[in-house]
Amino acid sequence: MAFSYPPRIFKDGKPHIQIKSMNHYCFLSKFQTMKEYIGEDVWDELKNSSVGVFLKLTDINVTHKYIWASSIVNFFLSHQLAVDNIHEFWSLIDGQPLRFSLHEFKDITRSKL
């Protein structure tokens, strides 16, 4: 039985590098250096902004030894399905659709969204 899924954003799981790219050189350890440089007040303001979710990864890393696997994220992005819901990310992994939304993000990061 063949299943029908939304089309992939990139053909054959190979993203066009000029359309979207990903930084493989992001190290959570650099966030601590940035925090020391800008100070607690500015850091707390940033944590409460739209980019705060990334800064909160440093807190998770200290407590739970969070590991950022850019190769896995790159795989998910290159197999991304075109869906209408902007709050969900769908990827086709080994012929099976996989949903990643804020619910899954919350569970993985133990964040209080």
Image (tube, helix red, strand yellow):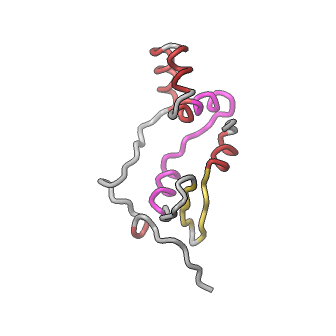
Residue 101 relative to residue 34: left or right: right
Q: Is residue 110 above or below residue 13?
A: above
Residue occupying the point 66% across, 38% down: 113
Q: Position of residue 89 (x, y in %)?
A: 55, 56
- Asked which quadrant contains residue 26, the reply is top left
- In this view, the residue farthest toward the left is 18
Residue occupying the point 70% across, 38% down: 110
Magenta range: 56-79
Q: Is residue 42 above or below residue 17?
A: above
Q: Is residue 13 covered in magenta? A: no
Residue occupying the point 37% across, 49% down: 21
Quarter that holds the N terminus: bottom right
Q: Position of residue 98 (x, y in %)?
A: 61, 62
Q: Is residue 58 covered in magenta? A: yes
Q: Position of residue 111 (x, y in %)?
A: 67, 37
- Which is more toward the observer, 97 or 49? 49
Q: Main secondary structure of the magenta part?
A: helix
Q: In this figure, what is the number of numbered marks?
A: 0
- In this view, the residue farthest toward the bottom is 1
- Which is more toward the observer, 91 or 69? 91
Q: Position of residue 16 (x, y in %)?
A: 33, 59
